[in-house]
Image (tube, rainbow, N blue to C red):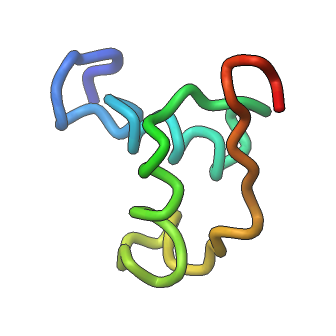
Amino acid sequence: MIYCRRDASEDYYGHTGAFRCLVEGGGHVAFVKHTTVTENTGGKKREWWARDNLNDDFELLCPDGE
């Protein structure tokens, strides 16, 4: 497997990849679009890492920290 490719062949590429890294325990914070959490929770994705996540399990913070 090639790591750190800058395309969709990398599991942790882009906003969804950053969110996946967070879900898998690879970090405590992920910098994603404001829609990424909703797009990948609540059964919207069938991938094993996203399947059981709920929107309420995550919190979005604004740039001012609130």
In the image, taking residue 47 as reference, residue 6 lies left or right, namely left
Along the viewing direction, whichever of 40 and 4 lies nearer the viewer:
40
> Is 5 placed above or below 60 here?
above
> Is 58 placed above or below 53 here?
above
Residue 7 picture quarter? top left
Residue 54 picture quarter? bottom right
Task: Tell me the quarter of the image containing the C terminus.
Answer: top right
Along the viewing direction, whichever of 22 and 66 lies nearer the viewer:
66
Along the viewing direction, whichever of 47 and 18 lies nearer the viewer:
18
**Residue at left offset 76%, top offset 18%:** 64
In the image, taking residue 37 as reference, residue 14 lies left or right, namely left
> Is 43 placed above or below 40 here?
below
Task: Tell me the quarter of the image containing the N terminus.
Answer: top left
Expressed as whole percent of the image width and height from the top left, the position of residue 48 reads 47, 72
**Residue at left offset 52%, top offset 70%:** 41
Expressed as whole percent of the image width and height from the top left, the position of residue 25 reads 73, 43
**Residue at left offset 49%, top offset 43%:** 34
In the image, taking residue 13 as reference, residue 57 lies left or right, namely right
**Picture mark count:** 0
In the image, taking residue 33 as reference, residue 1 lies left or right, namely left
